[in-house]
Amino acid sequence: MHLKSLRLQGFKTFARRTELPFSRGITAIVGPNGSGKSNLVDAIRWALGERNARGLRGQKMEDVIYSGGPGKSAVGMAECTLTIDNADQRLNVEFNEIEVARRLFRSGESEYLINGSRARLKDIDALLASTGLRQDGYAVTAQNDIDFVIQAAPALRRELIEEAAGVRRLRDQRQEAINRLGEADRDMRRARDILNELSPRAEELRTQAASAEEYRKVADALKVLQGSLARDAWRKAMVQLRKALARQQTADHKRVAANQAVAEFEPRYAEHRATLLGAREARWRHQEAVADVRLRLAESEHQARIAQERNLAAVQALEALQRELERLDASEQAGTRVVDELARGVEAARNELEAASSALQAAVEAEQAARDTQGALEADRIARLKRRHEAQRETASVDAELRQLEGRRQFLSEQQQQARAQLEAWSVRHATLSEEFDRRSRIAQAAGHELSEVSQATASLEQRQAETEAALEAARKTVVEREAALRSLEAELGALRTLRDGAQRRWPIRSDANWERLLELIDVEPVHRVAVEAALEGWLHGWVARDRGSFESASAALAAADEARDTLLYPQDSDTPAAVPDGLLPIIDLVRAADHAARLLNHLLRGVVLVADRSEGARVVEHHPELRAVTPGGEIITAVSYRGGQAADALLEVQSRIRDAEQALDGERHAALRAAEEVEQLAAVRSALTAERQTISARVDAARTAAAQAAGALAAATDGVQRESQQEGQLRQQLIRIGGLLQQAEQTEVETLGRQRALGETETTADLELAALEQQIVEVAASLRDLTDRRQETELRAALARQRSDDLDRQLERAQQTLRSHGNELAQRRAAEGELAVQPALINEERLRWLETSQTLRVELETLEAAQLPDVDTLAALEAQLREDEQRNVTLQVELAHADDAWTASVADHEAAQIEVDRCALALREGGQEVEDDTEAIEDVDWQKTEREVSRLQRRLDAMGAVNLLAPEEYAQVRDRCESLSAQLGDLEAATAQLNELRQRLEEEIDSRFRTVFQSVAVNFQEFFAELFEGGRATLRLEGEAEGNPLDEGVEILAQTPGKRLQPLTLLSGGERALTALAFLFALQAVNPSPFYVLDEVDAALDDANVMRFNRVLKRLSADQQFLIVTHNHSTMAQAEVLYGVTLGEHGISRIVSVRLHQDALIPVGERSA
């Protein structure tokens, strides 16, 4: 599983779509400061869910969207996609490749995607929870965040280890359980408060319900009496209703007659009115038609005049357009000439640029030739100066030789005289020297014998001392190896004990020698451990007491413990073992234990036998129900039960490994003690040998001094004798040699004088040649300056020619663009000319159409003016008849209104009577009485007696005061509410107990996993720290309150760099802090590797030596892991298989260049632009 690619678009400086493919191993991202390297790291963190804008080096989250640059507008969206290879199915999904993407729009909307489907950040965290790839995980180390591990609080370091242990999900479940506990506790408090409030209210409502019941009985009696009164009132209302109905019928007859008279008159009236209106309407329509025709005639004539004016305007516009076309043609021709001239200018400028370039090349070559000539002359001058200096030195040597020969000649003369005098004194000294030689010979022989003896003793002592030093060094190395093995075994033993004790509860009894776990007292062969563990399941963690008193005291203490539960065992004399049928193997025969434990095991394993498989066990217990059968796989079969499945912990295996580790630890401790004792013994022997050597060294020095003195004296005597013996012959030979030397010196002096004269002539010739050569060098230098000036002038001309060429190119492009614009405008004007050419004819046709319309309208107007219309007398007669009809209509309408008013009044009386009847009927129905149509069957009521009884009952109701008639219903509701709350409270208490149990179980599992992983991380941290610091020591320690929750314990780092004492991490240098943090991150990686790691300039604070060690570790880990590292260090770049170079281009947009390193060669693999 590894990161295959990173795809960006619109993220910070990566404005355009950019994709970076990655391979396994190390990928280095390099580039200058500010080019956008760290933006790639920010993109990975952002895609993984980083929600803190400051963590991405911004003020708000919208800052990650590219904000534009000079000449480049801002984009509206940022997107980042991580493609992860899941071919090994480490992520438990069905896809071999997973894409995790995040988008952010400038409007503030954002979304997460998994393989193109929208998802939540919670889904991404759940998907990557077991890999350390979270926004707050340890897989991505941003810039300047390497000190986070050092400066972070111990609780934050614990979170990193928990991330490696994979307990973050359990942490979330525990927190969810705690939140649900808080909610349940809040709901319980609220339910109790509501119950406390409702209980008094229920009692009050119960009293009110009794009062309401009594009130209801009195009210029912009152209602019966009021019903009899209401029935009598209903009978009287029915009588009034019948009278009102008769009056209504009479008024209705009158209203019908009036309506009939009106209906008979209205047709005649409507006919007269319609005739008058028709005549009037005919005159109005004729007038409107005449006016409309006149208006249309005026409009036609007006449109004809307008068409004539438009025709004239079109002709004028056509003439103007033709003049404009002539002007544009001339402008186009001028533009064509300008373009041609500019093209010729461009061609000339290019020719000039080529000529200038050729001249520049020739000038550069001439300048280079002059420089070569100058260099050759300078070399020749230097050679000649060297030869001149050699000649001068030879001349000085000859002069010195002449002076030496002169002095030698004088010296030889003096020596010749001294030799003659010494020859005369030799005979006197010879006798004295012979006697002194004999005496010193005897002293030298004695000193030589003493020195030989002492030298032999010294050689023997040095050999013994070297052997002792070698043995001491080997012993010290053995001690160091034993100590390392001892620490390793202690760490392994601690991890095994943590694994064994992970599920055990805290033992409430103070531990002493009287208590041992049953698990620690037994030993079983590996092949039978699963079966024995299953047979003793539930007893292995029990504590075995050695005596009865300890058992009783521990039982009392355990019974009083609030937070502990455990098993106490006491071995007693076992009964006779249960008889096991032949052919079956008792489990007790497979267990080895101490005597007191064996008695206990006889009791615990009574009737337990080992069988081959489940079927055999079923047959055994079928024939022997008193037995329990156990298979080698840990299955337990009895006559009434079966227990199987995978055991949670192989406790006997772990205990066996603990026992082996303890034995190995004891052996290593004894070996370490023996090695330390051997070191002390060898150190004592070395001290004794050192003292003895010092004594012998003093004797050797004394003997050597005496021997040297004797040898010196003997040598002096010998030399004196020999010298004196030889002196005579030497003196005689010296006289002869001195004479020859004098003659030789004189001859040599003559030869040397000749050499001196020749050297003087040679030096003079060399000075003349050197002067000529220097003059030539000056001339060449002047020529070189001229050539340099000419080359610079040529470069200037070439630059000017290039500038002119560029200017002409731009002018030509603008002229061509202008010419194209004129061409387009000319084409448009010509098209407009074609359209205008046909306008006059069209407008003239339109004018003719309007003239024809005008002629037609004049004819229509004459026809309308000649038409016949009703005269004024006819209209007057019609109006008089209509006035008479209107007066008759008014009279009929007044009569109809009077009839309607009478009918309305009767209807109102009828309705009032009906309302009274309905009211009385409603009162009867409310009183529970039936309403009958036969009013004669209703008996009369004694109103006075009935009203007195009603008054009495009413006073009784008034005396009862205000009564809550809804109290029975409210009481029933409150009672049901209390019962429901009591049931809910019971459910909440049960759920709280389950949640507390779940939280405790999760805390135990989290603590167990954390401590197991913590031991591994601590061991790995020590190894990586020692490798990065070469001899340093470091470890991890849990810190917390003694009575606090173990899950709140923080992780403290203890580190001691080589040559320094143990000190706080904050006092370490920047490089030491960085290496310590890297060692911690590598230790986490070794426990739970992430698919890839991103390191942003983590080597910035390291010197060359530390960088080499860091790179060595990084290279070793890259064999199995993928690393993406941002760096400026060349040593780190050399470790990478692929290099990505990031540069900042125009508009502030980052560009990517990739290079693959293979077999010490750089192979470019692509260039990408953002």
Image: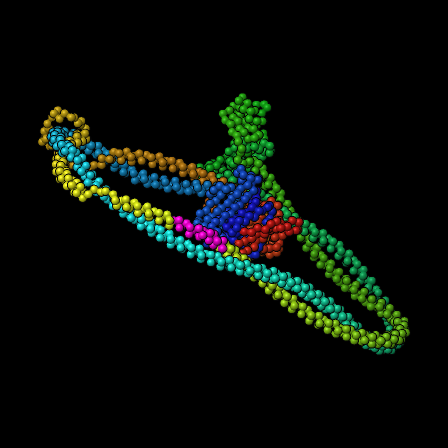
Magenta stretch prevailing secondary structure: helix
Mark yes or no: residue 949 visible.
no
What residue sits 61% from the left and 45% below the top? Answer: 1119
Instruction: Please state if 756 lies on the left or on the right of 45 as rendered.
Output: right
Q: Nearer the viewer, residue 699 or 31?
A: 31
Quarter occupied by residue 912: top left
The location of residue 894, given as percent across then percent down, is 13, 38
What residue sits 42% from the left and 55% below the top? Answer: 315
What's the magenta region?
Answer: 826-846
Mark yes or no: residue 696 visible.
yes
What residue sits 52% from the left and 58% below the top? Answer: 332
Instruction: Please state if 847 lies on the left or on the right of 374 as rendered.
Output: left
Image coloring type: rainbow
Quarter occupied by residue 584: top right
The location of residue 519, given as percent across then percent down, is 54, 36
Q: Nearer the viewer, residue 323 or 442?
A: 323
Instruction: Please state if 107 lies on the left or on the right of 528 as rendered.
Output: left
Magenta residue check for 838? yes
Is 401 above or below relative to 369? below
Magenta residue check for 813? no
